[in-house]
Amino acid sequence: MVKTVEEINQKIKEGNVRVVTAAEMKEIVAELGAEDAAKEVDVVTTGTFGAMCSSGAFFNFGHADPPIKMQRVWLNDVEAYTGVAAVDAYLGATQLSETKEMYGGGHVIEELVEGKEVELKATGYGTDCYPRKELYTEISLEDVNQAVMVNPRNAYQRYNAATNSSNRILRTYMGTLLPNFGNVTFAGTGEISPLNNDPEYRTIGVGTRIFLCGAKGYIIGEGTQHAPPYGTLMVKGNLKEMKAEYMKAAYFPGYGATLFVGIGIPIPILDAEMARFTAVRNGEIETKILDFGVPRRDRPVVRKVTYEELISGKVEINGEEVRVSPLSSFYMAEKIMKELKRQIEKGEFFLTSPVDRIPKEGASKPMRQKEVKIVKSVMVKAHTIPPHTSIEEAARLMIEKGLNHLPVVEEGRLVGIITSWDIAKAVAKDKTGSVAEIMTRRVVVTHPDEPVDIAARKMEQNDISALPVVDSKRRVLGIVTSEDLSKLIAR
């Protein structure tokens, strides 16, 4: 049996279409089988709601009097990109405010959709046709000519989960990761997420009409970093028609601003194959847990895991049970599925056939860079001492070895560091105890695979001249100094 989108739209028009959510479809296929389920069901609605950093909106503000060619523009002190036209700008969700803490482009977009006014500041360089050089006003969505959400990368098919092997808390785009594999976070809604229900992109393609933050939107292409089965979508919709309940601005501590975006996509059940696709279960959807405790681009895989395990709230790592928390809202995803189902049943939402296919294959390549020097290539052997070492003994070792820094190690782990300056101050104050009394306990460290420019930046930001090089268990592997980096630059 084969159906067409046109036949399904006719059923919508006549009011006799059968629509179910992706959650309901699993049970229907399990009970009836794919062939009979395809006869029974016309449309399956899907949903996802999560932080989608690669989001934003184009605005056309209209011309001021006298007119201005906006060279720079800010909305609530969040700068938007103006290199498109005189009074057009693109506001990215992750762009941060220059004056407000924990506030960014996503917050401006949400406030506009809520009906609030925002401050608009602009500067220009002045021309014969655009003589104005400064502008300050307030605007709302009603005031602008166009406000179009255009999101380059949304609705990830699946997403790598995250954990942290290091012994310090990490603030990341995957949320807060506790030390020593203290937790796992994950994103995506698994078996109800749109792209998992059409993995061959048969019905999801360029021109597919979607539910986007409460408005009708469209897929305009594959998203950036599209690499099935980690597929992504590029989408657009009219910001003026959107509803604030289906979007939420957020701020991840230590990372930055983002925007939670709600997307629902209807899957027409054209045949038994589409019915089988929409019967996918969380236990069949696999992803990887990556170790963010290793600061490099190709983070090591801790283990492979299914969404069924992730959603259960706990996974096993190294024989230990680790708690898991989602960054996506299953409650909102289900709400979106049900609302899209209601709109289709009421004849308020019709399906569209893709005008072009989205690639079924792809790869997300790393940036091509000049040779990147890493810390391992410049670090030198570190002489370490235990915390009970006397200040006098540490001073003698520094003089004999020509050292300025001595990492302090206890039971094989870094617990502090002393410098020649620390020794000099201790001598001046007639201190004669152990180095434990004078050492710096909160040690800024680096890792062997960290780029040297990042190590240099750490030294500059913390006004220090050396970094112990440690592994994930804080065992000292070496040390890198500002002198080592200077020699590298000289070479």
Image (tube, rainbow, N blue to C red):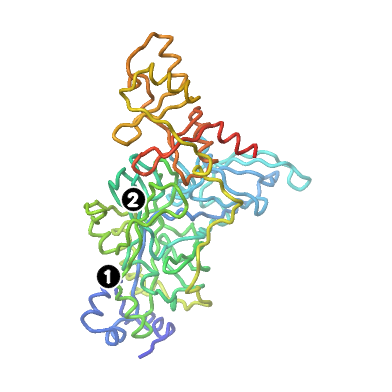
Residue 488 marker: none
Residue 110's spot in the image, x, y percent?
Answer: 44, 49
> Counting other residues with Cα less than 10 Å from the Cα at mark 2, is it few (<14), some (14-19), or many (20 or more)?
many
Q: Which residue is mark 1?
A: 23
Residue 6 or 297: which is nearer the viewer? 297
> Can you say which quadrant of the picture contains the N terminus?
bottom left
Q: Residue at the spot x=48%, y=60% of the render? A: 153
Identified by mark 2, the residue type is Thr
Q: Nearer the viewer, residue 43 or 423?
A: 423
Q: Identify the secondary structure beneath mark 1.
A: helix
- Give the foreground label among 1 and 2: 2
Residue 391: x %, y % from top left: 37, 17
Q: Which residue is mark 2?
A: 163
- Taking the spot 39% from the left edge, 87% from the top edge, the residue there is 3
In depth, the one of 211 and 483 nearer the eye is 483
Q: Is residue 338 left or right of residue 219?
A: left
Q: Is residue 235 visible?
A: no
At a point 23% along the width and 55% down the height, the residue shown is 314
